Amino acid sequence: MGESKIITKPNGELFNPDLAQRAITFINMLKHTKGEWHGKNFDLLPWQTQIISDVFGTVKPNGYRQYNTAYVEIPKKQGKSELAAAVALYLLAGDGEWGAEVYGCAADRQQASIVFDVACQMVEQCPALKKRIKPIISQKRLVYLPLNSFYQVLSAESYTKHGLNVHGVIFDELHAQPNRALYDVMLHGSGDARKQPLFFLITTAGTDRNSICWEVHSKAKDIIEGRKHDKSFYPVIYGAEDDDDWGDEKVWYKANPSLGVTVDIDKLKTAFNSAKENPAEENLFRQLRLNQWVKQNVRWMPMDAWDKCDFAVNAEKLLGRECYGGLDLSSSTDITAFVLVFPPTADDDKYSILPYFWIPEDTIDLRVRRDHVPYDTWLGRGQVIATEGNVIHYGYIENFIEDLGTKYHIKEIAFDRWGAVQMVQNLEGMGFTVVPFGQGFKDMSPPTKELMKLVLEQKIAHGGNVPLRWMMDNVYVRTDPAGNIKMDKEKSTERIDGAVATVMALDRAIRNEGSTDSVYNERGIIVI
């Protein structure tokens, strides 16, 4: 493997400059495929050169590549697809591997096709490759005839688990993978028969911290910061830290290594000014332009304000008090939330919140492993309640609510009108007033905005309930053209049942305040 002089780097790694230069030279011969750069030589930018040089030049004592996995996390518009396509072509045609199998992977076929299409255009613009590479467009496959190797598109939607003998994998936008299945298949065991397989993962930051991408991101971060060591893993993360000033141009340059070349600073300024004026765009700017992991596309609840409402809630002192319930049943295998809201009895009093959560006992261990959420810890603290079996035991919950009704004066219970009809009937049979509550903008917007206002004014007391805090932090809101908002379960990456139940209970409390005129009637609906 190479007759050049091997250099020992200051960190002790071995480096073969000829192998590094071979990859750089190959890529430099390719041409760009997009916009004003179309047809120009692919002259690697300094940050790209560094990656290619390190990945292809760093070797083990036997001369083969040291790095089997490269993780590159970077904002959009940095030339990510072009670099990924160039690496794919090098693994296909420049690496000297007979019968190489190179796969382009993404969440769906359309995404996986982006890098493939760039690679095809690069081949088209390079006479030497065009003579030797046969494209089979219908199969999304490129065949390099001299080595009988191929580059094939795969997606999470359709792939085969068996018979892969991987030399290279290009994983585009790892953060968009719906689950870890494709990642596990491609990276675990599929390259065992090869001397130096390379898994090249390139992505922008995501929103789901329970995803495979967050897992790999965390490993990369740990290696960069010296908490973990893995000689086969090469991490690169360009992005702003969580506490960086997102309006500081120095931060923009730190996060965008191609700023001023492929990214125009004026366009970034325009995007920033738009995000500053419209908070709904802030997280998108942070995620796509600064490569920050944000929880959802739109951050709704400012958690510092929520945490300031950590006023004690004494269940004993609330005995006999009037209150209103919100019931979110979710599905039979998910969390069920029941929240009591106690209206203030004096001017200096607050809306007190008592939340209750139930989860099927048999699914707790699975959920802890799968979701990385500490349901077992919460159970131990009494912050969630387990019901027998692998589905929610509605009879248990009905009895529990009936018992609560002997302690507190529950005037109304609001529920999602699409919820469990039987349970509603049973609660009515127990003497409760049960009110259907629509989940559309009309019903959800006023109390959702009111909750935000009360939180900002510190007129909510939640006692620091941990599961409820987690759920509030998970909330994504959707806005309609009229400026109405509602919590969106589909877009929120994790559970929000407690937040929804809180809003429903708060609505009933406000509408019945003073039994005649509600807060809404007194001052109209708050617009935030």
Image (tube, grey):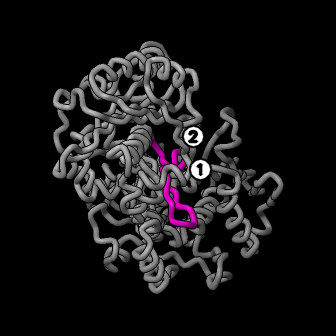
Query: Which of the two marks, 2 or 1, is nearer to us in this view?
Result: 1
Tell me the amino acid under the disc marked 2. Gly
Question: Which secondary structure dominates the residues rendered in magenta?
Answer: loop
Residue 164: in magenta span: no
Q: Nearer the viewer, residue 87 or 329?
A: 329
Residue 191: give its label: 2
Where in the figure is residue 149, as x and y percent of width and height? 71, 51
Neighbor class of circle 1 (other Cα within 10 Å; few <14, some 14-19, many 20+) is: many
Residue 453: give its label: none
Is residue 219 visible in the rendered structure shown here? no
Q: Which residue is mark 1?
A: 169
Report the residue that reaches farthest toward the front: 516
Point 32% across, 39% down: residue: 341
Q: Is residue 196 above or below residue 50?
A: above
| In the displayed structure image, the side of residue 119 where residue 358 appears, left or right | left
Residue 489: in magenta span: yes
| In the displayed structure image, the side of residue 250 where residue 524 appears, left or right | right
Element carrying mark 2 = loop
Tell me the amino acid under the disc marked 1. Val
Q: Are marks 2 and 1 in contact (CB under 8 Å)?
A: yes
C-alpha span from label 2 to label 1:
10 Å
Task: Point out the stretch of residues depicted in magenta.
Answer: 478-494
Q: Quadrant of the C terminus?
A: bottom left
Element carrying mark 1 = strand
